[in-house]
Amino acid sequence: MNDNAYHMILGRVRGERLNSRVLEEQIQMAVSMGYRMLEVRAYGQHGIGGRLWKAGDEQVDIRISGQSGQRVGSFGYANTRIEVMGPASDDVGWLNAGAEIVVRGHAANGTGNAMAQGKIYIAGNIGSRGMTMTKQNPRFAPPELWVLGSVGDYFGEFMAGGIAVICGHAPQTPGNVLGHRPLVGMVGGKVFFRGPHDGYSRRDAKQVPLSDADWTWLKENLRAYLERIDRLELLTPLSDREEWQLLVSRSASEKRGRQQRSMSDFRKDVWDRELGEGGLIGDLATYDRSGIPLIVTGELRRFVPVWENRKYLAPCEASCPTGMPVHERWRLVREGRIDEAVDLALSYTPFPATVCGYLCPHPCMSACTRSIGSLASVDVSQIGKASIKAGMPELPPLKEGRIAVIGGGPAGLSVAWQLRRQGYEAVVYDMAETLGGKISAVIPESRIPREVVAAELERAGKVIPYVHLRQELSREEVQQMREDFDYLVVAVGAQKPRTLPIPGGERMLTALDFLGQAKADSVTPGKRVVIIGAGNVGCDVATEASRLGAEDITLLDVQEPASFGKERDEAVAVGAKFRWPCFTKEITDEGVVLRSGEVIPADTVVISIGDQPVLDFLPEDVHIDRGCVVVNDFYQSTDPKIFAIGDAVRPGLITDAIGAGRKAARTISEFLSGMESTLEARQMIDRSRVTLEYFDPRFRTFGDISECGAHCSSCGTCRDCGICVQICPETAIQRADLGEGAYEYAVDDTRCIGCGFCAAACPCGIWNLTENTPLI
């Protein structure tokens, strides 16, 4: 490659060597300035080429000439390629997280120490303790270390993952290419080697035949390695399959099966034989010296691990007003059962795509354990949007029992949907021309595509019989409906806009009227629009006004605006201005007059300070407080046959209304079947129990729903990863297959010492370490 393409960084300036910190600052600055090909003329500086995260996903090539110091490529990022033009010092690729490192000579001790990703290519030999304490994230390719010659002593000590390839060409120790005491404590990974050796830790590793897949991998990657170190002429002499051997780690069960010397045998055969009866103080005391275990099991343990699978709600499920088990949907996605994940949503809402994909502010994502732990929350909207493909739910035969639902918005359709799924006929009465309430009537198409709403309303219409009423229901008619049906559900929403009793108030458009007319393209707002009320509905008015040609849009509020999320972001994006605290005095032909005397010019003024329900049709025995229906925990009003949900009870999110419909439907179903209704009592899992260290913090966005599923922490629900089995020092945990896909993890009390490793390592927080209370 043309040397002029490299940006030169000198490790010595005006005869003085730069210290390592200053050199690294210069490298980081060059990357920040956009340089992606760097040559570093080193004078023993440490850590060259590591942590070049500022380049993002763009590749950075580092060429190191001169004398490199320790830890070349330490914390190396996946975007980095490093080439050392000669030998390298200790700890090449220490804690490597993805970098490719080529050393065109020998490397010293600690090569690949604790690396988790990336590749290290050595064109010579390496010193002691190479490939020690390596690890592997199963979502990424294993880390690799390639050595042309041989390795030094204690190679692969506590190796927990990755692949090492030792070619044995011109080794520094021709009679022993693996060095002294290799692979002690090995628990994972593979070692391909070629040449003689003096043994390895047979307690931790074992030799296995090369499978066809192993040989294919080795042969293909051997060519790439030799090309990188410019030794392709060695491909033929190194491609004899019979010369290669393979070592892998022993499993926990294999290690457990090996006999170990007991403490009593050690005391009898070693201690007493060497020191005599009484040991170190035998000349002073002759008391009973029968063994007292330092680490106890069974009833003597101080703590006991308990497998609490599905005992607690995940934060996403606990925070979703509909009760949607979001983590369960991601589990199905991980298992490749995407259709089931999509259809599962229909058990909780008739609008899985409309709401979860577009309209919901996603409290589940705000509550996500990942976001609390500074990781990116899993993007629920992706599986929400995919739910447009959900099919028709299976409907049971109708039972005795009929329910009338007044209101065809999200709350009314939710309760009717849930009742029909439980086998009861629900008849929906609505004054509008179409079902859907505010979803169909006023929410802008910029927030949700028209075809999504139409598809989900069509599906709901096939499940729910309904009657259109284009006149207001009288109290007498509702009283008669109460007698004709087993139960009556009030889900009328809040359709009466609040307004201000100020002069010129008749000049104002309500937000509901404006949004309804805007959706029908039957309003012309002019160039200047003032919106009184800067909540999320006011923000919708702003974005629609901009779409219809408004250029100067101002939102006023008496306090800091309560708007948030997509609605606020989209209003800001169209240039809307937010002002507070502002108090409106009157509306004139010129615009909005504030109490301060300031006049804000306006062609159109929209009032958006909330809505309230119209409830004058209800029987007198239904108690109303501050304009809303009073209900108990089951959404039952003071009239036992009348339930109320949604904005008729309290203002809230669309998901609040849908969730209330589901709970009311469950209660009515229980009443009709003669059961006693109970509240769900499961608590949310303590987030501190969930271990996030297994997830890569660099993932801030997710490409598809499969990627989302892989990054879900599955809080409180076992992912069946088996980490607890692998980490238990006493091999006290076993997985039991219960049949039909069910399983459990059980603890052998005779082995368990209550150390808590299982609870500390469990990614999902399933294991709980409880204080032991043995029977006395």
Image: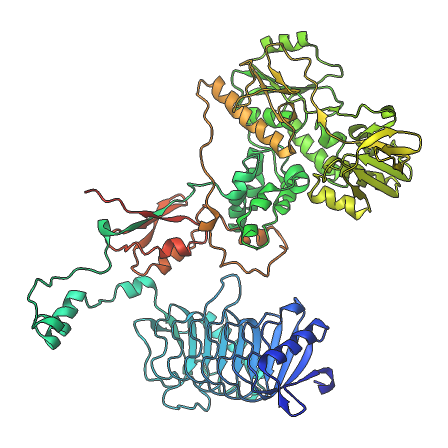
Image quadrant containing the N terminus: bottom right
Q: Tell me which colouring the rendered structure shows.
A: rainbow
Give above or below for 134 relative to 455: below
- Residue 396 in view here: no
Give above or below for 529 relative to 368: above
Q: Using residue 747 as the reference point, say whether residue 362 is left or right of it.
A: right
Name which quarter of the figure residue 738 lies in.
Answer: top left
How many marks overall? Answer: 0
Q: Nearer the viewer, residue 630 or 361?
A: 630
Name which quarter of the figure residue 490 lies in.
Answer: top right
Q: Using residue 52 as the reference point, say whether residue 717 is left or right of it.
A: left
Q: Position of residue 169 (x, y in %)?
A: 46, 88
Q: Nearer the viewer, residue 82 or 772?
A: 772
Q: Nearer the viewer, residue 508 or 178?
A: 508
Q: Position of residue 280 (x, y in %)?
A: 13, 73
Q: Position of residue 148 (x, y in %)?
A: 49, 85
View extreme (front): residue: 596
Q: Position of residue 201 (x, y in %)?
A: 32, 75
Q: Using residue 125 as the reference point, say whether residue 62 is left or right of it.
A: right
Image quadrant containing the C terminus: top left
Tell me the residue at 66%/27% (across/down): 461
- Residue 90 in view here: yes
Tell me the residue at 15%/65% (across/down): 264
Tell me the residue at 70%/38% (across/down): 562
